[in-house]
Image: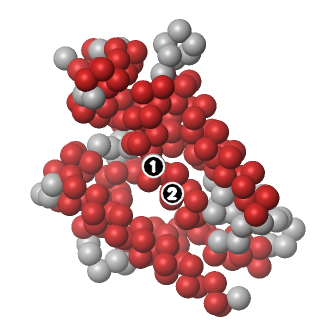
Amino acid sequence: MIEDITDSDLTKMIREENDETALNELIFRHSGIYVDMLKKFGFKCLTQIQIQDIMSDKDYVIYKAALEYDPSKAKFSTHLANKAKYMCLTQKTKNKKNKASTSFEEIQFYHKDKSLTPDESCKTNDSFTRILNLINKHKDQRLKVIFHERYFCGNRGKLKPWKEVAKKINLSAQGCINIHDKAIRELSHKIDNEKIKF
């Protein structure tokens, strides 16, 4: 069974055979690590859009990590964690060099509490609650189920696979992804437009 195959052998199957089942298994096993590294190294210094972009690249980054993996140097989980960390720190460095524009969440927090800079706290409980409220009030009620199942119902802190999310609303996995991605674009646009309040 695929669940019994080691990470090293899965990466070999991906490199030599471009095995999609092996890739899906790696994604299932290690998405949680990727998200954890994004939380640790990205949430306090990147904009919402940048976090979203890195998150949307997750499956591709895991695929690239599998192609580049050398089992003699480290465990696959360590290899992937380092890649995710590097992505966050690289973007942070670019932000400092380019003086990237402040996101809506950063501006909102800065106006509420000037004792902290946006870079110190660009993700707050208030903004997270706001985003969840926007999802809950969305006209497509399937969206609430998709987000809840995908981000809060996975095993051991991992993201629930799209095919399992899809079963909850009787859609294809791709159908769920399409609804999810469209909503992310809408929410990002809505949040960006709220900059005019300041």
Which quarter of the rendered picture does the N terminus lie within? top left
Left or right of 139, for residue 43: right
**Quick check: 76 above or below 131?**
above
Name the residue beneath numbered marker 2: 53
Name the residue beneath numbered marker 1: 57
Residue at point 35%, 23% (across, down): 15
Q: Amino acid at mark 2?
A: Asp
Residue at point 27%, 48% (across, down): 162
* Location of residue 23 in the rendering, given as x and y in whole percent from the top left corner: 31, 31
Residue at point 32%, 25% (across, down): 14
**Quick check: 193 above or below 52?**
below
The quarter of the displayed image where residue 99 is located: bottom right
Which residue sits furthest right?
115
Evaluate if marks 2 and 1 touch, with contact meaning CB atoms under 8 Å apart. Answer: yes
State the colouring used for the structure image: secondary structure
In depth, the one of 24 and 68 nearer the eye is 68
Alpha carbons under labels 2 and 1: distance apart? 6 Å
Name the element at disc 2. helix
**Quick check: 159 above or below 48?**
above
Q: In the rendered image, is residue 46 in sight?
A: yes
Residue at point 22%, 55% (across, down): 174
* Location of residue 154 in the rendering, given as x and y in whole percent from the top left corner: 35, 42
Which residue sits furthest bottom?
197
Query: Label 1: how many residues lie within 10 Å, few (<14), some (14-19) or many (20+)?
Result: few
In depth, the one of 165 and 153 nearer the eye is 165
The quarter of the displayed image where residue 181 is located: bottom left
Query: Label 2: how many residues lie within 10 Å, few (<14), some (14-19) or many (20+)?
Result: few
Which quarter of the rendered picture does the C terminus lie within? bottom right
Which residue sits furthest top?
72
Q: In the rendered image, is residue 144 in sight?
A: no
Q: Amino acid at mark 1?
A: Asp
* Location of residue 166 in the rendering, given as x and y in whole percent from the top left corner: 20, 53
